[in-house]
Image: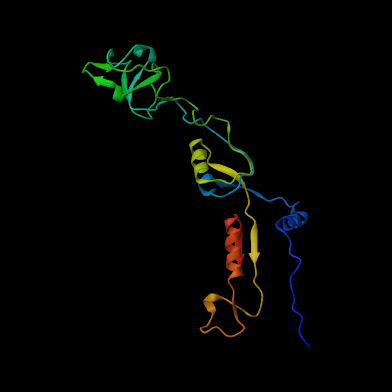
Amino acid sequence: MKRKRKVYRLLKTLGEARELLFSRFGALAPKIEEVRVRDGLGRVLSSPAVAQRSVPSYHQAAMDGIAVNASATFGALPERPVTLPKGPNALPIDTGEPMPGYADAVVMIEKVEDLGEAWEIREAVYPWQNVRKVGEDIVKHEIILPARVRIRAYDQGALLAAGVLEVSVFARPRVLIVPTGSELVLPEDAPDPLPEGALLEFNGQMLKSLAEECGALATLL
């Protein structure tokens, strides 16, 4: 008698499988845990991340040059420069340094000539030109990242810059993978040549890695 071959005909679509999964487990709520931002790469936020400080937190120079009050440079041109005496109202400044209280602009160093006792300004600047103002990148108390976002490397940088050291994330799902079958042999334990009827077990590792790519904690037994 000829043995009838079993054929798997009723395969489920991805949509059907997803619907089946959520119909049985959709009511389960994942646990919430706090993690350091430095350890949060790839984790999914359970609540919005809010800036604890502005970035920058003070007005700072965006160029190397001379910190000035912009109005003192009005009218300056290469052929008709403005001369400003060196002193408390025209100070050298480097990129990133805090702006002096009197200053609201920076003349690029390439547009300045050092005359010894004075600066020759060859190009006028307008108020706040070449200045990074408070909160230009991030404003304190604004939402940096919404909930249910996976944290990327760039996000870690933004969070740390804004004074966020810890975030609330969803706990990673735990996945247990148990390949079964007396014919299965681990590649590490397989003799050479492989006995007839024995099969190398490699799908378990593939499933484990796929689960880990999705952010799960996978265990292969």
In the displayed image of the protein, which residue is found farthest to the bottom? Answer: 1
The reply, left or right, for residue 205 in relation to residue 95 is right
Is residue 159 placed above or below 14 in the rendered structure? above
Q: Along the horizontal axis of the image, is 210 left or right of 107?
A: right
Looking at this view, is 135 or 37 the one in front?
Answer: 135
Q: Residue at x 54, y 78 (%)?
A: 189
Q: Quadrant of residue 203?
A: bottom right
11 vs 65: above or below: below
- Residue 105 image offset from top left, x and y in percent: 39, 20
Q: Position of residue 113 (x, y in %)?
A: 25, 20
In the drawing, does residue 134 fall left or right of residue 83?
A: right
The residue nearer to you, when weighing 213 against 134, is: 213
Whether residue 100 appears in this view of the structure is no
In the rendered image, which quarter is residue 206 located in? bottom right
Whether residue 158 is visible, yes or no, is yes
Q: Position of residue 35 (x, y in %)?
A: 57, 47
Count of numbered labels shown in the rendering: 0
Looking at this view, is 179 or 172 the one in front? 179
Quadrant where the C terminus is found in the figure: bottom right
Residue 57 locus on image (x, y percent)? 47, 28
Residue pictured at 50% horizontal, 38% vertical: 158
